[in-house]
Image (cartoon, helix red, strand yellow):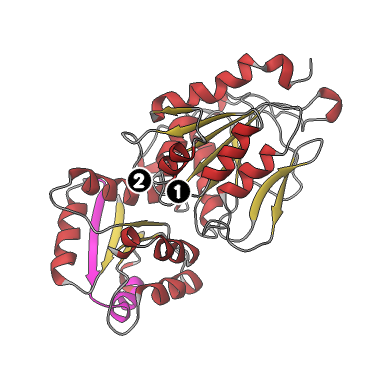
Amino acid sequence: MTRVLIVDDSAMMRHLLTAILDADPAIEVIGTAGDPYEARALIKELNPDVITLDLEMPNMNGIDFLHKIMQLRPMPVVVISSHVEQSAAVAREVMEAGAYACLPKPKLDDESSLLAMRRVVRQAELVLPGRGAADGALAPRTESRRMPETQPLRTSAGQPDMIAIGASTGGIEAISEILSTFSANCPPTVIVQHLPAGFSRNLAERLNRLVQPTVKEAADGEALAPGTVYIAPGGERHLVVAGASPKCKLLAGDAVTGHRPSIDVLFGSLAQMKGISVSAALLTGMGADGARGLLQILRNGGRTISQDEATSLIYGMPRAAAELGAASEILPINRIADALLATRKNTENEGMGQ
């Protein structure tokens, strides 16, 4: 059960959000607050799992309050505001401030917006420490399914094929679905999921208990190995892949396309690699991060996939990729895993230098 505190200065909106979220049996609204000061007291008293936050409020605006939450008591914050739909700059500022996700205000005549809100709040379970699998969110794997640890790749063995995935709002559920079909000896896989600092490790630990490959937070200088999924640390540095024997590199730098880590930065680094086959997918999320990087991979001979509108929680980044001509295929989420893995099978001799 995900316990939610709603923070909005409108009593009508607080009532509406409560009704929307309480309709989901996996969500419990444990309190509401009309301004940040009231919210601060309720956070201490109720210890919520997730906060929904409006941006325009009396006494302190939502972004300033978001900064304070991330400094003093980091937790998943879902910003719900009409401004994130009207202004890409506002959405970027919200994500840079540490929001777990941002969504437009719900529309009662749009069932998809109501479902999206519930799904995003439920997905927060996967970035909370010690939650998720134990609550039955997904069936945990058994240890007998894990294959022996694979040694780091060496140049003499040839460079492996690689998979890259980028996602934002709604991406945790989509990534979970893709990885659930990967075997324990899948190609090395690197992922950027837009998350605030501190949450990516929880996500990696949770997924590691649910899927067959080893899932871990990427470490600077770590060699890529088959059967391993590397998730970019949230909020602080960019993840790139570099070197003749590919390694994860974590680089300091400004936000790119409004994000740090940026999907464009990761994809761009993979597009520069020679002698390997790269397969990349851009999943659900607001904005355009990843679209240009996906185009770079396509131009370098890689296979590129964007999630279709019907299965995307937020059809922003995949739409940007499709409009840019960056996606060689546009697929529903349940077909993306097979498409990513097919590239490796079809080009194995070339990619492995055999």
* Residue 254 can be seen in this image: yes
Task: Give the residues drawn in magenta, as a range.
Answer: 25-44
Label 1, residues with CA under 10 Å away: few <14, some 14-19, many ≥20: many
Q: What's the distance in space between the residues labelled 2 and 1, CA to CA?
A: 9 Å
Q: How far across and down, in percent of the image, does residue 296 sit?
A: 62, 39
Question: Residue sitting at 51 percent across and 55 percent down?
Answer: 199
- In the picture provided, is 202 more to the left or to the right than 117? right
Quadrant assignment for the C terminus: top right
Question: Residue sitting at 27 percent across and 82 percent down?
Answer: 58
Question: Residue sitting at 62 percent across and 29 percent down?
Answer: 302
Question: Residue sitting at 40 percent across and 26 percent down?
Answer: 334
| Whether residue 27 is situated above or below residue 188 in the rendered picture | below
Q: How far across and down, in percent of the image, does residue 279 sit?
A: 59, 29
Q: How far across and down, in percent of the image, does residue 171 sit?
A: 43, 43
**What is the quadrant of residue 318 in the picture?**
top left
Q: Amino acid at mark 2?
A: Ile
| Whether residue 90 is situated above or below residue 56 in the rendered picture | above
- In this orientation, which residue lies closer to the viewer: 207 or 17? 17
- Secondary structure beneath dot 2 equals loop
Q: Amino acid at mark 1?
A: Ser
Residue beneath disc 2: 314
- In this orientation, which residue lies closer to the viewer: 86 or 352? 86
Q: Which mark is residue 168?
A: 1
* Dot 2 and dot 1 residues touching (CB under 8 Å): yes
* Residue 133 can be seen in this image: no
Is residue 222 shown in magenta?
no
N-terminal label among 2 and 1: 1
